[in-house]
Image (cartoon, rainbow, N blue to C red):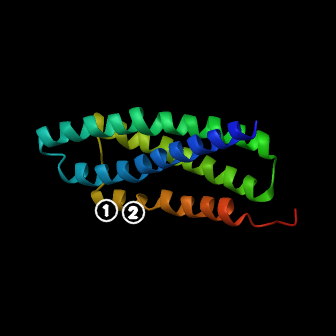
Protein backbone atom coordinates (compact mmCIF):
# COMPACT_ATOMS: atom_id res chain seq x y z
CA UNK A 1 0.00 0.00 0.00
CA UNK A 2 2.85 2.34 0.81
CA UNK A 3 4.33 2.01 -2.68
CA UNK A 4 0.92 2.73 -4.26
CA UNK A 5 0.78 5.98 -2.28
CA UNK A 6 4.23 6.99 -3.52
CA UNK A 7 3.38 6.15 -7.14
CA UNK A 8 0.19 8.17 -6.94
CA UNK A 9 2.21 11.02 -5.42
CA UNK A 10 4.67 10.88 -8.36
CA UNK A 11 1.79 11.13 -10.84
CA UNK A 12 0.16 13.89 -8.78
CA UNK A 13 3.31 16.00 -9.01
CA UNK A 14 3.77 15.19 -12.70
CA UNK A 15 0.21 16.22 -13.58
CA UNK A 16 0.52 19.31 -11.39
CA UNK A 17 3.61 20.38 -13.34
CA UNK A 18 1.80 19.87 -16.66
CA UNK A 19 -1.26 21.76 -15.40
CA UNK A 20 0.86 24.64 -14.10
CA UNK A 21 2.75 24.82 -17.39
CA UNK A 22 -0.55 25.17 -19.24
CA UNK A 23 -1.83 27.82 -16.79
CA UNK A 24 1.34 29.84 -17.18
CA UNK A 25 1.68 29.42 -20.95
CA UNK A 26 -1.93 29.93 -22.06
CA UNK A 27 -2.17 33.57 -20.90
CA UNK A 28 1.22 34.16 -22.53
CA UNK A 29 -0.23 32.88 -25.80
CA UNK A 30 -3.15 35.26 -25.24
CA UNK A 31 -0.64 38.13 -24.89
CA UNK A 32 0.81 37.42 -28.31
CA UNK A 33 -2.57 36.59 -29.83
CA UNK A 34 -4.05 39.91 -28.66
CA UNK A 35 -1.23 41.70 -30.46
CA UNK A 36 -1.73 39.69 -33.68
CA UNK A 37 -5.54 39.52 -33.82
CA UNK A 38 -5.59 41.40 -37.15
CA UNK A 39 -3.17 38.97 -38.78
CA UNK A 40 -5.58 36.22 -39.83
CA UNK A 41 -3.02 33.47 -40.45
CA UNK A 42 -1.16 34.08 -37.18
CA UNK A 43 -4.44 34.43 -35.28
CA UNK A 44 -5.67 31.08 -36.59
CA UNK A 45 -2.39 29.45 -35.57
CA UNK A 46 -2.76 30.85 -32.05
CA UNK A 47 -6.34 29.54 -31.88
CA UNK A 48 -5.12 26.01 -32.60
CA UNK A 49 -2.27 26.27 -30.09
CA UNK A 50 -4.54 27.68 -27.37
CA UNK A 51 -7.23 25.06 -27.94
CA UNK A 52 -4.81 22.16 -27.85
CA UNK A 53 -3.00 23.47 -24.78
CA UNK A 54 -6.25 23.97 -22.88
CA UNK A 55 -8.08 20.80 -23.89
CA UNK A 56 -5.25 18.31 -24.54
CA UNK A 57 -2.83 19.23 -21.75
CA UNK A 58 -4.38 21.63 -19.22
CA UNK A 59 -7.80 20.12 -18.64
CA UNK A 60 -6.74 16.44 -18.52
CA UNK A 61 -3.94 17.42 -16.13
CA UNK A 62 -6.41 19.31 -13.94
CA UNK A 63 -8.68 16.27 -13.73
CA UNK A 64 -5.78 13.94 -12.92
CA UNK A 65 -4.42 16.35 -10.30
CA UNK A 66 -7.81 16.28 -8.59
CA UNK A 67 -8.14 12.49 -8.78
CA UNK A 68 -4.65 11.80 -7.46
CA UNK A 69 -4.89 14.61 -4.90
CA UNK A 70 -8.14 13.31 -3.47
CA UNK A 71 -6.64 9.83 -3.20
CA UNK A 72 -3.57 11.21 -1.41
CA UNK A 73 -5.82 13.18 0.96
CA UNK A 74 -7.85 10.05 1.69
CA UNK A 75 -4.68 8.16 2.61
CA UNK A 76 -2.95 11.06 4.42
CA UNK A 77 -5.87 12.49 6.37
CA UNK A 78 -6.95 16.09 6.90
CA UNK A 79 -4.59 18.75 8.27
CA UNK A 80 -4.85 22.54 8.45
CA UNK A 81 -2.18 23.04 5.81
CA UNK A 82 -3.97 20.58 3.54
CA UNK A 83 -7.25 22.49 3.88
CA UNK A 84 -5.52 25.71 2.80
CA UNK A 85 -3.87 23.85 -0.09
CA UNK A 86 -7.27 22.47 -1.06
CA UNK A 87 -8.78 25.98 -1.21
CA UNK A 88 -5.80 27.21 -3.25
CA UNK A 89 -6.36 24.37 -5.74
CA UNK A 90 -10.04 25.35 -5.93
CA UNK A 91 -8.99 28.93 -6.78
CA UNK A 92 -6.56 27.56 -9.38
CA UNK A 93 -9.39 25.47 -10.86
CA UNK A 94 -11.62 28.54 -11.06
CA UNK A 95 -8.77 30.40 -12.78
CA UNK A 96 -8.48 27.52 -15.27
CA UNK A 97 -12.20 27.74 -16.03
CA UNK A 98 -11.97 31.55 -16.29
CA UNK A 99 -9.30 31.17 -19.00
CA UNK A 100 -11.85 29.23 -21.06
CA UNK A 101 -13.83 32.47 -21.41
CA UNK A 102 -10.88 34.17 -23.10
CA UNK A 103 -10.18 31.10 -25.22
CA UNK A 104 -13.75 31.26 -26.53
CA UNK A 105 -13.49 35.01 -27.12
CA UNK A 106 -10.40 34.55 -29.26
CA UNK A 107 -12.02 31.62 -31.08
CA UNK A 108 -15.06 33.77 -31.91
CA UNK A 109 -12.94 36.84 -32.73
CA UNK A 110 -14.62 38.79 -29.93
CA UNK A 111 -11.65 39.38 -27.62
CA UNK A 112 -11.78 42.88 -26.16
CA UNK A 113 -8.79 42.60 -23.81
CA UNK A 114 -5.38 44.03 -24.59
CA UNK A 115 -2.13 42.15 -24.18
CA UNK A 116 -1.34 44.05 -20.96
CA UNK A 117 -4.37 42.47 -19.29
CA UNK A 118 -3.11 38.99 -20.15
CA UNK A 119 0.39 39.89 -18.95
CA UNK A 120 -1.09 40.79 -15.56
CA UNK A 121 -3.31 37.73 -15.13
CA UNK A 122 -0.40 35.54 -16.20
CA UNK A 123 1.05 36.05 -12.69
CA UNK A 124 -1.99 34.74 -10.81
CA UNK A 125 -1.16 31.01 -10.95
CA UNK A 126 2.40 31.71 -9.84
CA UNK A 127 1.21 33.28 -6.58
CA UNK A 128 -1.34 30.54 -5.96
CA UNK A 129 1.39 27.96 -6.58
CA UNK A 130 3.57 29.73 -4.02
CA UNK A 131 0.85 29.29 -1.39
CA UNK A 132 0.44 25.62 -2.33
CA UNK A 133 4.19 24.96 -2.14
CA UNK A 134 4.47 26.64 1.25
CA UNK A 135 1.65 24.47 2.55
CA UNK A 136 3.06 21.24 1.09
CA UNK A 137 6.73 21.75 1.96
CA UNK A 138 6.60 23.68 5.24
CA UNK A 139 3.30 22.16 6.45
CA UNK A 140 2.59 24.95 8.93
CA UNK A 141 0.54 23.95 11.95
CA UNK A 142 -2.64 25.83 12.69
CA UNK A 143 -4.32 25.99 16.10
CA UNK A 144 -7.72 25.07 14.67
Q: Are marks 2 and 1 in contact (CB under 8 Å)?
A: yes
Compared with 138, 64 (above or below) is above
> How crowded is the residue under tag 1: few (<14 C-alpha within 10 Å), some, or many (20+)?
few
**Is 85 situated left or right of 75 in this image?**
left
Q: Nearer the viewer, residue 127 or 60?
A: 60
Taking the spot 74% from the left edge, 59% from the top edge, the residue there is: 81
Quadrant hosting residue 133: bottom right
Drawn side of residue 109 relative to residue 66, left or right: left
- Residue in the foreground of this view, choosing between 136 and 101: 136
Spot the residue most to the right.
Answer: 144
Q: Quadrant of residue 35?
A: bottom left
**Quadrant showing the N terminus:** top right
Residue 66 picture location, percent across and down: 62, 38
Q: Residue 116 bears which disc, if any?
A: 1
Q: Quadrant of residue 135?
A: bottom right
Point out residue 25 in the picture as x, y percentages from the top left corner.
Answer: 36, 51
In the rendered image, the quadrant that contains the C terminus is bottom right
Dot 1 lies on which element? Answer: helix
From this viewpoint, is residue 37 visible? Answer: yes
In this view, the residue farthest toward the front is 3
Q: Which residue is drawn at the image coordinates 19% and 46% (left, top)?
A: 37
Residue at point 42%, 50% (across, down):
21
Residues packed near mark 2 inside 10 Å, few (<14), some (14 to 19) or many (20 plus): few
Q: Picture coordinates of residue 142 (x, y %)?
A: 82, 66
Depth order, front residue of 5/105? 5
What residue is rendered at 19% in x and 36% in y?
44
Vertical placement of residue 137 versus 45, above or below = below
The image position of residue 12, as x and y in percent, is: 59, 43
Tell me the residue that label 2 is attached to.
120
Lateral position of residue 54 relative to residue 91, left or right: left
In this view, 131 is above or below 77: below
Amino acid sequence: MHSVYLWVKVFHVMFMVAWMASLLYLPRLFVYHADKVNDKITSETFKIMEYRLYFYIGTPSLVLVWITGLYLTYILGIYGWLIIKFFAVIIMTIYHIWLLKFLKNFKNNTNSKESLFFRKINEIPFFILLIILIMVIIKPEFPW
